[in-house]
């Protein structure tokens, strides 16, 4: 009685794959780093729309290049004619900066408008980054403590390892693809933390219930049984959440693209890790009925 | 878990209806509708400007220390205690005394409230006094600085409000942020250049004589004349300042055919101005704004009426702005704009459209999937989901919460995750139906046994959302608001609406075949 599908046969294989992905992600994060947006790096972002269909990205870039801006980047942004321009700026306090920029730009471009302008000073961006990192760290700690109260420490470690796996690999993929990290990505990461935890807790809840019920089944098979019993729920919830996220990704506009992409990665990874990462940890710690009884003493 | 008393059913219905009622007021444009509450749209959705200003406290701290130096020197002179070698160090005042007076001086700094005020609220003195190598070092305590910051911020926010109000933008919001910052939100404003230039100026106006004496120690300084570009030597003695102004407005001067700013002085200012012009006929009077000379006319006549004109090659716009700045008064300290975010109204509109479209599509996909998976029970769960969305909107309306683009994403995510609780329950019921013949008991067990998993799952998400609420900023905060309220309404809709409908169906069909597909 171990359930229809033998997930536990793949524990070792999946753990090796995850370990490779995890180490590769760490490698990317260390050596390539993350592509921080203006929220965290400071600087100016302009979303520009041009009604002149003859313009290509090179034309827009060429026009901005003539303005002597530091660290300039020009990219297409969603719909035809929409661009995002980013650059560094030393003095945020020059009140007429944008006005002057527009005047200069008028020499090189026509039929354009600024749809969005963001200026973030170095002090604020440093604080926002600090807040983002603190928020994620506190969220991880809070999850660890919560699950420690609700379960035993072995479960707690299993869940945290799974969450770390999801967050690091998600960020690793962002690093690999040079996708922008901004405030909404922090929100996405926090939601991933919550979602991954959610998925793991549901399976763990069943593991604990089964531990009490079946003294004779070893943890290796017991986790498999529990995964099978909760499998349809795990899949259905992942599907409905992904349906919602895909809808945001495709129809929610350019601003939510990064956010929904991070969440989609997180949900897929979270579903995978709650089965293939969190449960093997219980096996390694040789969790048994005794683990629960000891706690209750 | 399946039994509902009649009273309970009625309260559930009343509760849902009242929230739905609130949510509906968002869709009704009728002015007569007695409910005026609506969800606020964030700046990213309705377009507008957000500015974060930081008060530069350093000039004021230096000023405070400078006047403290004078106060301390006079204080000891009056007490006939010999002190000397006064100096203004970095963030501190230094002075010396005879060695036998040192104890006494330290004692006075502890006990005389006039010399060193004690704040009962903070349990701290305003100044810290130390004797290092026979030199007294006087610096502001942490709370001394906080006190300065607070009063600075209070004054600055008042001036900022006046200036923004004068420009007349639509429902601006001006709030303190932290100990030394002011957040300004200007809905609907897609070009903040004018406000930025108005807030970026201290607008410290003074009228002072131009002197011939070039020695700086004589109390004069070299300032640049904006009009002519030359440097003039201006006395540091202030005749009148912006504080004496009661009105200022732009005016067309018909004689020279240029725009000027005309001003009216208060009584004290008028008297001082009259005396100064009487004694100073033939002299040049410098009108100084933020350490730059706007103009320096020669006094030809006594001006006793208490009103006058400033000319300085203004355009009508710059004269209007100067008049506005003078009317609103000088900022106590310079303000730095450290963050600015502006969204054009068309982008906001596009974001709303995209947000609503993705909400509808996501919603339909989830609904179809649930019907496919659970048939009748899918319908029940979908009904609960729809009520859930209205309740979520109802709560947002009651709290007049701000809906942002990430906030809409939070609602869509709620749709995706809200069904989770029902899925957990239905799957559990399926398992129980295999073991238990009595359908009512099987359903009851399904609800009871899935409860801990549901609570755990939702509490973890709420923890993440709350942390985001505390640390998040701007639109992202809106995401945590909708996500957390969404979780609460989800739990309610699952345990009261979906369970009520399920129980009605099961109890009615307790002898028939009931399956969850």
Image (cartoon, helix red, strand yellow):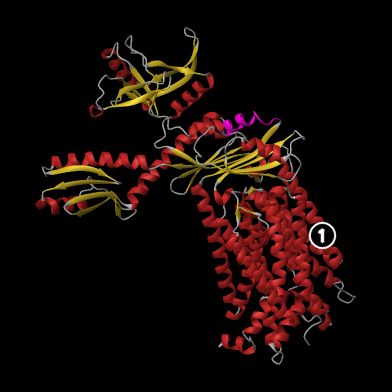
Q: How many marks?
A: 1
Q: Residue furthest top?
A: B255
Subunit bearing disc 1? B
Between residues B21 and B289, which one lies in front from this camera angle?
B289
Q: Say if A234 sits above or below B64 in the image.
A: below
* Residue B17 is at least partly visible in this image: no
Task: Look at mark 1 in the image and give the residue it sits on.
Answer: B367
Say whether residue B91 is left or right of residue A38.
left
* Residue A1 lies in quadrant: bottom right
- Left or right position of B444 against B222: right
**Quick one: A172 or B3, which is closer to the camera?**
A172
Q: Which residues are magenta?
A: A98-110
Horizontal side, residue B233 vs residue B482: left or right: left
Which residue is pictured at 57% across the width and 85% down the height?
A295
Q: Is residue B350 magenta?
A: no
Residue A73: image x %, image y %? 63, 45
Q: Is residue B380 above or below residue A51?
A: below
Horizontal side of residue B141 vs B479, given as left or right: left
- Report the quarter where the C terminus of chain B lies: bottom right
Q: Residue at x 75, y 43 (%)?
A: A79
Mark 1, secondary structure of its residue: helix
Q: Nearer the viewer, residue B447 or A174?
A: A174
What residue occupies the far left of the structure in this picture?
B100
Residue at 33% over, 17% down: B285
In which quarter of the view is residue A281 placed? bottom right
Q: Residue at left 60%, top 87%?
A: A291
| Spot occupied by residue A157 in the image (x, y as percentages of width and height) | 59, 76
Crowd rating for badge 1 (residues with CA inside 10 Å; few <14, some 14–19, many 20+): many
Quadrant of the image containing the N terminus of chain B: bottom right
Which x, y percent locates residue B320?
51, 22
Q: Residue furthest bottom?
A: A216
């Amino acid at each position: 009685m171990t359930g229809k599908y033998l997930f536990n046969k793949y524990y070792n294989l999946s753990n090796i794959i995850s370990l490779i992905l995890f180490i590769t992600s760490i490698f990317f994060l260390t050596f390539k780093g993350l592509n921080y947006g203006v929220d965290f790096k400071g600087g100016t972002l302009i979303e520009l729309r041009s009604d002149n269909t003859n313009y290509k990205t090179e034309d827009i870039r060429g026009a901005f290049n003539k303005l002597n801006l530091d660290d300039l980047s020009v990219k297409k942004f969603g719909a035809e004619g929409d661009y995002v321009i980013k650059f560094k700026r030393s003095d945020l306090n020059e009140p007429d900066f944008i006005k002057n920029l527009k005047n200069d730009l008028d020499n090189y471009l026509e039929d354009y408008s600024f749809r969005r302008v963001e200026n973030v000073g170095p002090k604020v961006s440093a604080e926002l980054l600090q807040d983002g990192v603190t928020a994620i760290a506190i969220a991880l700690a809070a999850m660890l403590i919560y699950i420690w109260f609700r379960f035993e420490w072995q479960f707690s470690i299993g869940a945290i390892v799974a969450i770390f796996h999801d967050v690091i690999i998600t960020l690793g993929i962002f690093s690999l693809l040079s996708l922008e990290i901004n405030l909404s990505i922090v929100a996405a990461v926090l939601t991933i933390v919550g979602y991954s935890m959610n998925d793991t807790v549901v399976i763990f809840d069943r593991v604990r219930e089964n531990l009490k019920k079946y003294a004779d089944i070893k943890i290796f098979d017991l986790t498999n049984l529990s995964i099978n019993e909760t499998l349809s729920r795990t899949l259905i919830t992942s599907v409905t959440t992904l349906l919602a996220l895909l809808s945001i990704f495709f129809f929610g506009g350019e601003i939510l693209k990064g956010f929904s992409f991070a969440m989609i990665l997180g949900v897929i990874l979270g579903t995978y890790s709650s089965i293939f990462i969190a449960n093997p940890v219980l096996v390694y710690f040789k969790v048994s009925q005794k683990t629960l009884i000891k706690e209750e003493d | 878990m399946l039994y509902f008393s009649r009273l309970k059913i009625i309260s559930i219905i009343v509760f849902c209806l009242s929230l739905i009622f609130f949510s509906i007021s968002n869709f009704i444009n009728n002015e007569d509708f007695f409910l005026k509450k609506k969800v606020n749209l964030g700046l990213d959705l309705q377009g507008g400007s957000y500015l974060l200003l930081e008060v530069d406290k350093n000039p004021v701290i230096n000023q405070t220390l400078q006047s403290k130096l004078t106060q301390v020197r006079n204080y000891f002179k009056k007490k006939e205690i010999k002190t000397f070698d006064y100096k203004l160090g970095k963030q501190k005042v230094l002075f010396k005394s005879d060695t036998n007076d040192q104890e006494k001086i330290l004692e006075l700094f502890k006990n005389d409230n006039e010399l060193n005020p004690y704040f009962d609220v903070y349990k701290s003195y305003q100044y810290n006094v130390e004797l290092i190598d026979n030199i007294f070092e006087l610096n502001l305590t942490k709370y001394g600085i906080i006190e300065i910051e607070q009063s600075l911020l209070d004054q600055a926010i008042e001036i900022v409000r006046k200036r923004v109000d004068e420009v007349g933008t639509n429902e601006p919001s001006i709030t303190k942020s932290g100990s030394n910052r002011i957040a300004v939100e200007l809905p609907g404003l897609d070009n903040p250049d004018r406000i930025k230039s108005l807030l970026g100026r201290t607008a410290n106006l003074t009228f002072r004589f131009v002197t011939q004496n070039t020695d700086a120690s004589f109390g004069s300084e070299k300032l640049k004349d904006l009009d002519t570009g030359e440097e003039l030597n201006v006395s540091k003695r202030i005749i009148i300042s912006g504080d004496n102004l009661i009105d200022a407005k732009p005016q067309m001067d018909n004689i020279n055919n240029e725009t000027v700013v005309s001003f009216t002085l208060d009584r004290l200012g008028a008297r001082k101005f009259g005396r100064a012009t009487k004694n100073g006929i033939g002299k040049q009077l410098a009108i100084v704004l933020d350490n730059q000379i706007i103009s320096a006319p020669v006094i030809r006549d006594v001006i006793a009426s208490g009103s006058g004109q400033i000319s300085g090659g203004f355009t009508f716009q710059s004269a209007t702005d100067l008049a506005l700045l003078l009317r609103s008064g000088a900022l106590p300290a310079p303000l730095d704009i450290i963050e600015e975010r502006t969204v054009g109204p068309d982008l906001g509109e596009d974001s709303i459209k995209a947000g609503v479209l993705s909400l509808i599509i996501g919603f339909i996909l989830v609904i179809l999937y649930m019907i496919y998976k659970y048939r009748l029970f899918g319908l029940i769960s979908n009904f609960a989901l729809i009520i859930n969305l209205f309740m979520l909107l109802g709560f947002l309306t009651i709290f007049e919460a701000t809906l942002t683009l990430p906030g809409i994403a939070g609602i869509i995510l709620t749709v995706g995750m809200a069904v989770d609780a029902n899925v957990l329950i239905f799957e559990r019921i399926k398992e129980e139906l295999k073991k238990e013949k009595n359908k009512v008991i099987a359903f009851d067990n399904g609800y009871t046994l899935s409860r801990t998993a549901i609570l755990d799952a939702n509490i973890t998400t709420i923890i993440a959302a709350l942390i985001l609420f505390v640390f998040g900023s701007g639109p992202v905060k809106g995401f945590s608001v909708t996500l957390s309220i969404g979780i609460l309404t989800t739990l309610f809709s699952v345990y009261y609406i979906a369970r009520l409908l399920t129980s009605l169906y099961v109890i009615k069909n307790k002898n028939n075949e009931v399956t969850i597909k």
